[in-house]
Amino acid sequence: MTEAPSRLAADPIGVARDQWVERGWESAAPGMAAVTSLMRAQQIVSARVDAVLKPLGITFARYEVLMLLTFSRRGSLPMKLIAARLQVHPTSVTNAVDRLEQAGLVHRSTHPDDRRAFIITLTDAGRALASRATSDLNEQVFGRPELDRDDLESLVEIIGRMRSAAGDF
């Protein structure tokens, strides 16, 4: 059994920010601290999400595909549209769909209007797993993000501005 790492006496990102300033990089110090903090927070959140989804046999990428299909009117979407909505390369969607199909969670069929394209359809097992995973994530991760509601709203708004400025939407 592995032990959880002990808490550090000081925030290493804060220490790094101070070192940036000491070296004369004051103008870049806030950006370095923000980017590094975002990346560390992403690691923390990813570990929490993975701990919930791993016992269910899926990754977050596969969960996103299942949820996108769950939210669609027919429970099916063209693979190309899945890639566009998830903002990932089509190869990533192919990999996720391959694994989901092997597990019996989705079904792939040829698009009726384009033989080169595929329609991905959620199976009953996929719908059930998506429901269970969402319930578990809501209880263990999304419903307990370690921030109050106002902070969450501010965080989403700030990161949204960053994403928009980068051309994400």
Image (cartoon, rainbow, N blue to C red):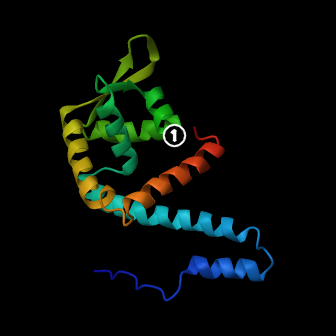
Q: Tell me the amino acid under the disc marked 1.
A: Val
Relative height, residue 146 to residue 157 (above, below): below
Q: How many marks?
A: 1
Residue extending furthest toward the bottom: 9
Compared with 37, 128 (above or below) is above
Front residue of 99/82: it is: 82
x%, y% of residue 93?
A: 44, 37
| Image quadrant in which the N terminus is located | bottom left
Q: Look at mark 1 in the image and give the residue it sits on.
A: 88
Instruction: For mark 1, give the secondary structure.
Output: loop
Q: State the image coordinates of residue 37 (x, y, percent, origin top left).
A: 55, 67
The quarter of the rendered structure image containing the C terminus is top right
Decide if residue 7 is on the left or right side of residue 20: left
Judge whether residue 107 can be spotted in this image.
Answer: yes
Q: Is residue 166 visible?
A: no
Picture coordinates of residue 28, whole percent (x, y):
74, 67
Location of residue 13 (image quadrant) = bottom right
The crowd level at tag 1 (other Cα within 10 Å; few <14, some 14-19, many 20+) is few
Instruction: Give the image location of residue 58, x and y in percent.
Output: 31, 50
Q: In the picture provided, is 38 more to the left or to the right than 3?
A: right
Against 56, residue 108 (above or below) is above
Residue furthest toward the top? 113
State the residue at coordinates (44%, 36%): 94
- Residue beneath the point at 35% across and 58% down: 49
